[in-house]
């Protein structure tokens, strides 16, 4: 899909991913529009850090400590210089008259947008969140909370002083807070809490599911659907919590309210933001794709091997229907926001306007507005059900009503029938459904399958989860496979958890078989897996390296064996250069760049692969090796030498020029000469060694130097083919007449007529364009003049509601019987005639004081008064 970064507004199609596997032809649920106008200029020089949405306006915070008030179209209405560092959060009350702001340097400001009076303080730690009471504008609700390493409630007393109360501390940084009615919800490193401000009670603690997630990288998302429903998103988990009133008979020492989780489910990707949409949810997801997924999603011609961040995909905006035990995906769109490959999960935010179905996707360099297209509430997902024979199906559907039959007995009869018929595979498959958790029936069936010699058929259906048979059962099946089928044995070892059987006994059995066949790769691989189960990773790694097995990288990552491979880097790269380099670069903190370069010093071709990928990821990390890379590119990868020279800011140009000249790399030498300022020499090489007039013309266009064009013309003047190229291409940069005058009389120039015709045609086209522009300008001017005339000819209503713009008294007198004079200008400003100054020397000339003051520019008296 084409990028949309260069345009201010795009249709919804250009913000969503064109999935090649999308079968549905239904209209999308949301449409998208990029927030532009003032936002575009802000994000060119700064980056968005947070935003809050009011029905009337938007408040945008940036990484450089500024807060901008914007109208709905993105135009800047006010600007506040709050700090020099990142604004962490902005909070507005329901009226939109007061704002709370906190920043990374510990500054907290709460003030009225029209008064600037309020609370200003500096803390000794970063303040991550701030939230005003929804009714903060009312005098009896002057409350707000801030969150850093603890959650503080501020309240102004009758002496107009602020008193503080610690609501919570000791569980890490407060990363999110949302205030709705009398309920405050906040998130810290361990979970989400809710506090009832009316009863001064904490009423719940929703624990974080995945404690391994870093809260600063994958922050918690909180959203109030209504006054009692809180939506919590953290990592890949979403929970919908409802605050309910407790039965008075059950209170005792308990809070008067409690929280019930009515829905909880996992998502495929990391959650960046949540918002309600009727009875559904709008979820913003951060998506990562591995290299294999990205290659399969693109044709080879579209894969860019030089791409920096190839694992960060477009963020997704999904509409989800929550269910009691899961969810349904109603729609899903992948959004092409600016610089999405540079963003992390914490860089995205989702804000919504409660008055309208508007959703704002905020990223550091882009803000996209999503609007609801239509209410598609009839879409539902059908659960796929397994099909059984008629009798068993009828018994399962009506199992609560049947009396003479039992579902399990019918199933056993069906299994017996399949065994008698010789369909052992189907019989074994039915065991999983019919036998359920009855261990006695399971063991009886296993021994029956052993008796008929069909242990292999039932092996893949044996229980291996919470319900487990005796270890002897699993070992019996493994020994059976080990005698007859090495591949099947290896499959079972991979699929079965190591706790199902005695691992040491199976290791010994495999070792005995290896004595007879010591080079069998299947048995060796299986033995390595068994060693892994037994946590003998060094022996498993030794086998994997010996076999050059693909799982060697997974083993190293999973069990952190980087200290064991520092002297095996060459061996790993000989096995698979791409995987080895990716692993080394992903774990620079465990194996340093210098250590890898030292190990690969004797293998320059491998060193080049490593340094090339390092450069593609980060142009600056390996800067001290850029000089060495010049020779490596020249020796092993010349196609990438020129891109390297273009992108690197650390390689010595003189050294690069020397190498390129030694190897007669003309294109690279031309680039280096132009970069060093020797454009004439570069142009001379293009003309003399490449003899490519088109490339010479392109070079001259890039440099845009009149002397360079003069050199090009002088060199080409005695070469007819070059003159033809110049005549065809320089019309927009150099006057062709200058070139034509210098052509020697009698010189035969190929295709001269066609070139001259093209010059004349281009000139004629320019004339036509000018005439067309003139017609458009005249038509627009006439249209605007007519519009202005119609506007000024309209009548003006004058009533008791109008005032004199000079004395500010009512324009009409209270006693309409008295004579009065009123002057109304075309600009709709009204004055008492006596309030207007004398017309001066211009007879009958009167002017609007306000409009004439505005024409004088800033500093006029009227403008100062309006401030």
Image (cartoon, grey):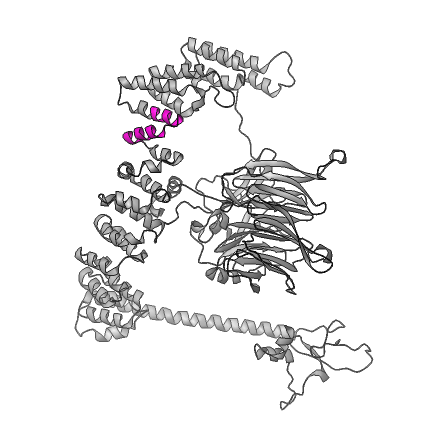
579 on left or right of 180:
left
Which residue occupies the foreground of this view, 450 or 166?
166
Which residue occupies the foreground of this view, 33 or 274?
274
227 on left or right of 699:
right
The answer to whether 161 is drawn above or below residue 828 in the figure is above
Find residue 77 and report its horizontal and vertical position in percent.
58, 64
Find residue 466 and report its horizontal and vertical position in percent.
52, 23
Furthest-bottom residue in this view: 841
The answer to whether 833 is drawn above or below residue 100 in the figure is below
Q: Is residue 661 magenta?
A: no
Tally the marks.
Answer: 0
- Please tell me whether the stretch drawn in magenta is mainly helix, strand or loop: helix
Find residue 846 and report its horizontal and vertical position in percent.
65, 84
What residue is rendered at 44% in x and 58% in y?
Answer: 6
Which residue occupies the foreground of this view, 674 or 24?
674
Q: Name the quarter where the C terminus is drawn.
A: bottom right
Q: Is residue 531 magenta?
A: yes
What residue is rendered at 62% in x and 78% in y?
Answer: 851
Q: Quadrant of residue 172?
A: top right
647 on left or right of 811:
left
Q: Quadrant of residue 59?
A: bottom right
Specify start and end residues of the magenta stretch as a single range. 526-549
The answer to whether 842 is drawn above or below residue 513 in the figure is below
Find residue 546 and report its horizontal and vertical position in percent.
27, 30
Residue 618: tell me if it is visible.
yes
Residue 306: tell me if it is visible.
no
């Amino acid at each position: 899909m084409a990028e949309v970064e260069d345009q201010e507004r795009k249709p919804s199609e250009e913000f969503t991913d064109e999935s090649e596997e999308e079968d549905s032809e239904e209209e999308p649920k949301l449409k998208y529009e990029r927030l532009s106008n003032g936002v575009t200029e802000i994000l060119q020089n700064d980056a968005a850090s947070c935003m809050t949405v009011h029905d009337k306006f938007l408040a945008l915070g940036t990484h450089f400590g500024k807060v901008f008030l914007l109208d709905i179209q993105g135009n800047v209405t006010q600007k506040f210089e709050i700090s020099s560092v990142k604004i962490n959060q902005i909070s507005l009350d329901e009226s939109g008259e007061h704002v709370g702001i906190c920043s990374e340097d510990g500054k907290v400001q709460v003030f009225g947008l029209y008064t600037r009076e309020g609370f200003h303080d500096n803390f000794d730690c970063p303040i991550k969140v701030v939230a005003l009471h929804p009714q903060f504008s009312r005098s009896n609700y002057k409350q707000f909370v801030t969150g850093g390493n603890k959650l503080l409630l501020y309240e102004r007393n009758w002496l107009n002083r602020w008193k503080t109360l610690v609501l919570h501390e000791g569980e890490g940084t407060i990363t999110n807070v949302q205030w709705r009615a009398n309920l405050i919800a906040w998130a810290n490193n361990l979970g989400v809490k809710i506090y009832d401000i009316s009863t001064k009670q904490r009423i719940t603690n929703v624990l974080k599911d995945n404690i391994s997630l870093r809260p600063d990288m994958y922050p918690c998302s909180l959203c109030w659907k209504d006054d009692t429903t809180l939506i919590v998103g953290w990592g890949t988990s979403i929970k919908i919590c409802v605050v309910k009133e407790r039965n008075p008979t059950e209170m005792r020492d308990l809070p008067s309210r409690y929280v019930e989780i009515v829905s909880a489910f996992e998502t495929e990707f990391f959650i960046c933001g949540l918002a309600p949409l009727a009875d559904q949810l709008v979820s913003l997801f951060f998506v990562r794709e591995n290299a294999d997924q990205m290659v399969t999603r693109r044709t080879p011609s579209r894969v860019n091997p030089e791409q920096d961040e190839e694992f960060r995909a477009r963020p997704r905006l999904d509409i989800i229907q929550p269910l009691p035990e899961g969810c349904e995906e109603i729609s899903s769109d992948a959004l092409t926001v600016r610089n999405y490959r540079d963003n992390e999960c914490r860089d995205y935010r989702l804000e919504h306007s409660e008055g309208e179905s508007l959703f704002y996707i905020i990223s550091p360099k882009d803000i996209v507005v999503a609007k609801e297209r239509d209410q598609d509430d009839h879409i539902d997902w059908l659960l796929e059900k397994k099909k059984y024979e008629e009798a068993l199906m009828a018994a399962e559907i009506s199992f609560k009503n049947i009396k003479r039959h039992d579902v399990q007995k019918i199933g056993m009869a069906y299994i017996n029938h399949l065994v008698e018929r010789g369909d052992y595979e189907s019989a074994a498959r039915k065991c999983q459904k019919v036998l359920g958790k009855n261990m006695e029936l399971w063991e009886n069936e296993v021994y029956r399958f052993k008796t008929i010699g069909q242990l292999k058929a039932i092996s893949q259906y044996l229980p291996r989860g919470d319900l487990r048979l005796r270890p002897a059962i699993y070992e019996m099946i493994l020994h059976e496979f080990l005698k007859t089928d090495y591949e099947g044995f290896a499959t079972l070892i991979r699929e079965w958890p190591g706790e199902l059987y005695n691992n040491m006994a199976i290791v010994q059995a495999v070792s005995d078989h290896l004595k007879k066949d010591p080079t069998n790769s299947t048995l060796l691989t299986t033995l390595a897996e068994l060693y892994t189960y037994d946590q003998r990773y060094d022996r498993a790694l030794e086998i994997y390296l010996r076999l050059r097995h693909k799982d060697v990288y997974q083993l190293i990552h999973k069990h952190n064996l980087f200290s064991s491979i520092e002297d095996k880097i060459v061996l790993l790269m000989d096995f698979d250069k791409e995987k080895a380099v990716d692993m080394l670069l992903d774990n620079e903190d465990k194996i340093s760049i210098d250590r890898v370069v030292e190990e690969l010093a004797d293998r320059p071709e491998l060193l080049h692969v490593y340094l090339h990928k390092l450069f593609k990821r980060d142009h600056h990390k390996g800067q001290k090796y850029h000089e060495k890379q010049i020779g490596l590119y020249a020796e092993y990868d010349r196609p990438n030498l020129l891109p390297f020279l273009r992108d690197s800011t650390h390689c010595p140009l003189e050294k690069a020029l020397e190498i390129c000249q030694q190897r007669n790399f003309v294109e690279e030498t031309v680039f280096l000469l132009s970069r060093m300022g020797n454009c004439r020499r570069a142009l001379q090489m293009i003309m003399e060694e490449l003899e490519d007039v088109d490339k010479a013309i392109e070079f001259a266009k890039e440099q845009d130097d009149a002397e360079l064009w003069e050199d090009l013309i002088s060199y080409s003047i005695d070469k007819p083919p070059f003159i033809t190229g110049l005549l065809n291409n320089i019309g927009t940069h150099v006057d062709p007449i200058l070139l034509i005058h210098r052509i020697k009389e009698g010189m035969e120039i190929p295709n001269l007529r066609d070139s001259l015709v093209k010059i004349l045609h281009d000139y004629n086209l320019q004339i036509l364009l000018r005439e067309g522009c003139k017609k458009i300008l005249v038509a627009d001017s006439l249209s605007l003049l007519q519009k202005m005339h119609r506007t000024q000819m309209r009548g003006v209503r004058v009533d008791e509601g109008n005032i004199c713009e000079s004395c500010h008294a009512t324009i009409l007198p209270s006693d309409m019987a008295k004579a009065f004079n009123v002057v109304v200008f075309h600009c709709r400003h009204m004055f008492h005639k006596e309030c207007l100054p004398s017309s001066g020397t211009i007879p009958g000339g009167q002017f609007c004081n306000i409009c004439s003051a505005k024409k004088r520019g800033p500093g006029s008296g009227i403008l100062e008064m309006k401030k």
